[in-house]
Image (cartoon, helix red, strand yellow):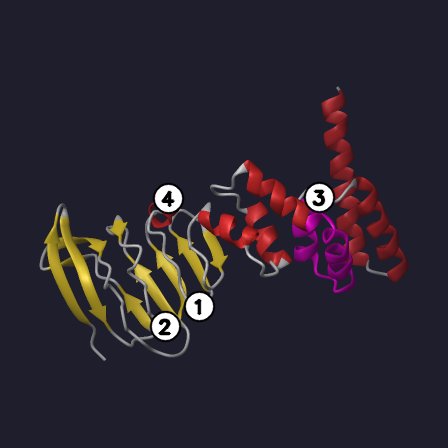
Amino acid sequence: MTARIEIVQVDGGLEITRLTTNDISIVVPSSHQGMPVVSLGPQFLRDSHASGNRTLVIPSTIAKASEEAMVSVTGIRAINYLGDFETFNSFGWTLSTDCQVTCADGFSFFFLAGYPMCFPRFDDEILTSHQRISEEVVMARLMNPVHLTDDNRVRYEHYLRNRVVPMAEHAMMENDVNALRSVIDSGLLSEGDIRKLLEDSVRSGKTVITSVLMSILNQMHSKQESLDK
């Protein structure tokens, strides 16, 4: 289906008031008839239904968007914004599906369905909901703390504190080096925890994990020695 676009003129260029398509890949134009497209209106993708995993590509010319622009759209699983996250954050969108958002400045985060794709609103709402937060989401926020308030950081860390050792043990048993490093990088494991993991790794014959844990302990000691000088 060829996309049907409705456009009006606004300050600085054009606003897409409606884009109707059931394409799997939706590419928003950066210009129309020689004028830049700078805004997305409240009816932008309303009722543009399709099944499957859809991707929305938004040019960096889009600097404003209505918070209602994504209401009732279905199937969007990935959004690639070719501008910076600060601008995308101002859109305040919420989708009915989980969605991976990637921006040109290197920001990337997997937003959960039903929660705002902006900070700190995402943190505020998910931390006060009764839904169990996955450890992966919490780790992702602590590793990517854009607009993470001190209060929400403490709440995320408290949520993880009783879960990090089992997470590290699981990563060790699965020989998942990346997952283990992510847990350790959270800073919630003590040196004693890491030593215990090393002992278990040696007993289990996990040679790669053992090497990683020894390297991490050596780095911790080197850092402490530098601070003591």
Q: Amino acid at mark 1?
A: Thr
Q: Which mark is residue 170?
A: none
Among the 4 quarters of the image, the one containing residue 33: bottom left
Q: Amino acid at mark 2?
A: Thr
Measure the C-alpha gap from mark 1 to mark 4.
22 Å
Image coordinates of residue 219 in percent, x first then y, are 74, 38
Q: Name which residue lies at 37% across and 67% down.
A: 55
Among the 4 quarters of the image, the one containing residue 95: bottom left
Mark 2 and mark 4 residues within 8 Å of each other at the beta carbon: no
Q: Amino acid at mark 3?
A: Leu
Q: Which mark is residue 188?
A: 3
Dot 2 corresponds to which residue?
74
**What is the chief secondary structure element of the magenta stretch?**
helix
Mark 4 and mark 3 lie on one chain; the one further toward the N terminus is 4
Dot 1 corresponds to which residue?
97
Q: Tag 3, which secondary structure?
A: loop
Total number of numbered discs in the rendering: 4
Mark 2 and mark 3 lie on one chain; the one further toward the N terminus is 2
Residue extending furthest top? 229
Q: Is residue 218 above or below residue 108?
A: above
